[in-house]
Amino acid sequence: MLSRWQALDSWLSDHQALWKPVPFYTPHPDWADVYPELYRALRGLSAEEYAALQQDETATTELLSRWLPGLKQRSRLLKGFLADECELQASDWVLSENQAPHMPERKRVQAGLLASCLQPLSQPITDWCSGMGHLARTLAVASDQRVTGLEWNPELVERGKQLIHQTRCAHQTRVTLQHQDVLQLQANTAQWPDSTHLVALHACGDLHRHLLHQAVKAGQERISVVPCCYHLTADIHWHPLADATQHSALQGLSANEMRLAVQETVTAPQRVTEQREELNRWRLGYEALRQHLTRDAHYRSLPSSSVKQLQQGFPEFCHWAASQHGESLPAQVDWPFWMNQGAQRYAQVQRDELLRHQFRRPLEIWLVLDYVLFLQEAGYQVSLQTFCSREISPRNLLIEAQRYAE
């Protein structure tokens, strides 16, 4: 595991000038001057060519390797961890609609496939960040064990309890949902879970990092974690967990740079994707207008936008955006022109992201291998695998850690 992490660390470091600049904020990245032919090739892609490459990372790698031979190492570095290498298999533990009413189908499949990978489940379980208890209920069926779900949102806890009561299945009696801020839990205290096995499916950032730290301190017998949203942390910069990774050339990675690891979304409905892209075009159209009016070439961020703003039109959106910056817009603006500027700029962003996204999965593996090495150093036997296909969830890396018997 260490040699794999070191190879990724070196490769990501060597190519950081290609993936650290965020295309949305950087119209002309520095690498464009170093690789002008690559820059022109990306910008020259037709809509059809872009759409085809967006769906085929291997073809994208082959194309970009004409200018960047180092990208040919990508497949070797990711061997065994590419999302499309894990085929969706049938699972006996995917609950039926009758067993899990009001559980979204995708959640039922995710939870069922994870339960299959965790077999045998022979110890009491704690579901870390359990939400409404979807995974907890699945694990109760798949294990015949007592399952305790910990969730900080009391509304989700109450809704989960109602679902358990409504289902009236025998296995549900083994599920207990508790209101608990897991970030307040400390190892070796009375509040620490008494379950032998800790499980976390898509616990974000500090939530899964805190679990790893405290579970190791507690000497937890078994830890199963599917991490998510590595950038959601109170720390300004990335800090490695393992001793072996302390001298990484990427020490100090920003949260915004870590966000790249989770940018792949394949589960959003088409309508939602289209709305998000339209808002992005409007943001860039407004930004082009703002820079024209103020002669300020530096991108200024905006608060999150609601898709409801699409109903109000581009001019109203721009007035709202200007108000967020404490500015006002002229009475006369050529709205179609600036809207078109946003569309053109977004097309450039998408093409530049074809290059940046080549480093998306390698960065995620690099982050997760740090966790694996941390657990190994703490005396755990650790494996890392994909538990479902990327179509079910791009965040499909499962860390399995079993403490060595003393």
Image: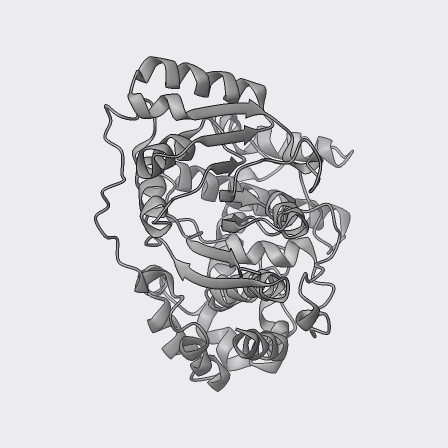
Look at 42% across and 84% down and name the residue there.
Answer: 66
Tell me the quadrant of the picture where the C terminus can be found: bottom right
Q: Is residue 101 visible?
A: no
Q: Is residue 289 visible?
A: yes
Residue 32 x %, y %: 59, 75
Which of the pair 81/372 is nearer the observer?
A: 372
Residue 217 x %, y %: 68, 50
Look at 69% across and 45% down and name the residue there.
Answer: 301
1 displayed left or right of 89? right
Which of the pair 65/295 is nearer the observer?
A: 65
Which of the pair 340/374 is nearer the observer?
A: 374
Look at 66% across and 35% down and name the residue there.
Answer: 321
Residue 325 x %, y %: 75, 37
Which of the pair 351/232 is nearer the observer?
A: 232
404 displayed left or right of 44? right
Q: Quadrant of residue 170?
A: top left
Taking 169 as reference, is 279 above or below it? below
Residue that extends furthest to the front in the rendered view of this protein = 406
Taking 105 as reference, is 4 above or below it? below
Look at 67% across and 65% down and name the residue there.
Answer: 242
Taking 251 as reference, is 125 above or below it? above
Residue 29 x %, y %: 63, 68
Q: Quadrant of residue 234?
A: top right
